[in-house]
Image (cartoon, rainbow, N blue to C red):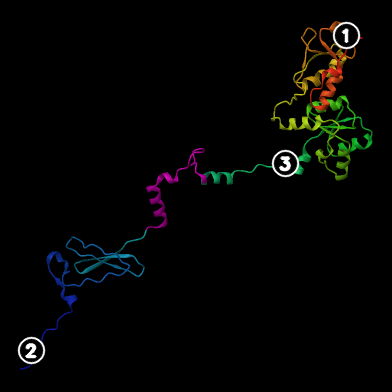
Amino acid sequence: KSPAKSPVKDPPAKQAIKRTATHGALKVSTAAVPEPEPDADEEPTEESPTKESSVKGTSKRGALQDITTQGSSTKLSKRKRPTKKAEAVAVTQVAPDATKAVPKGKEAKTPEATKARVQTAPKKKTASKRDKARVKRVFVLSSLSDMDVILPTIKALGGTIESEVTAKTTHVISGGKRTRKVHDGIARGLWILSPGFVFQSLTDNMWGDEAKFEVTNFPACALQRKLREACAHGKKFRGEILKSASVFIPDRILAKDLTPLIRLCNGTVAGANGSAKVILTTVYQPKYRHATQALPLWIYDSIANGEMQDLEKYKLSDG
């Protein structure tokens, strides 16, 4: 007799799977199946407490696969990664406050935020030469000899000429003599310039630099002009040369000429019945002997020098 053939044994993996009729499903005996060694970059997973076993692996794309065996069929399901749109929705749901606009004026007061606001703040525009050239210039001319050149030059460059100093006047072109117009320009803090300013502007075909041609005969010119420039915009400029002066002018013609100057320099002009300290007159008048009588030159000299002059030099006496 030939020896009995031993039955061919299945591999251990197949022996571990025993078909049963319970619910028509396959039961996997995890005791006989050796567990695969986890990869170095894969985290260990806990076993499912249910009777069905779930084996997790890694596909070529790195997506997780769940293999569930039921009956004679095997279902393969893939976990889809969230799209960018879904991620954006999730971020909005988790942190809705991050998408809210911050009310103006309630931003975080941090050094970084302050620095960012400073960098993004609009820069202030500085006046260029072209902008300065567009400034309207109104001139008053005093004791000049080259009028045939000065007049057409000012008009050609866009300037305006007036006969008297007013609130619109910006420049006074002086031939060097002290006149009523010059004193009025000093009291208002205007540019008092020599004729060279006009000649240089004619050569350059544009307005020149006023600072180079400001007259130096009268110390108060630059002083009053700087005070006017430092004065806040919108406020009427008034100097303080005659701040403590209180005068009365009996002569009407003289009063018409001096009153605006005195008030521009913050002085006081009293009435006939007022208690003025100084009477301005060209001739001594006995009826005003109770007060100090002085020459009107005291007012002009004080304005030209930018400060109150000594009254004793201008006093009038009887006899």
Q: Quadrant of the N terminus?
A: bottom left
User: Which amino acid, mark 2?
Assistant: Ala
| Residue 116 coordinates in the image, percent (x, y) | 55, 46
What secondary structure is found at the residue carrying circle 3?
loop
Residue in view at x 58 percent, y 46 percent: 119
User: Which amino acid, mark 1?
Assistant: Gln
Q: Dot 3: within a 10 Å radius of its alpha carbon, few (fewer than 14), some, or many (20 or more) residues?
A: few
Quarter of the view holding residue 213: top right
Query: What residue is shown with label 2?
Result: 4
Indicate left or right for 99 with 206 as reference.
left
In the image, residue 285 sits, relative to residue 23, either above or below, namely: above
What secondary structure is found at the residue carrying circle 2?
loop
Of the residues under marks 1 and 2, which one precedes in the sequence? Answer: 2
In this view, the residue in front, 275 or 66, is: 275
Viewer can see residue 167: no
Question: Disc 3 vs disc 1: Cβ atoms closer than 8 Å?
Answer: no
| Residue 206 coordinates in the image, percent (x, y) | 83, 43
User: Which amino acid, mark 3?
Assistant: Ala
Q: Dot 1: within a 10 Å radius of its alpha carbon, few (fewer than 14), some, or many (20 or more) residues?
A: some
Tell me which segment is drawn in magenta: 82-111
Residue closest to the far bottom: 1
Query: What residue is shown with label 1?
Result: 285
Residue 97 belongs to magenta span: yes
Query: What residue is shown with label 3?
Result: 127
| Residue 117 coordinates in the image, percent (x, y) | 56, 44
Residue in view at x 94 percent, y 36 percent: 148
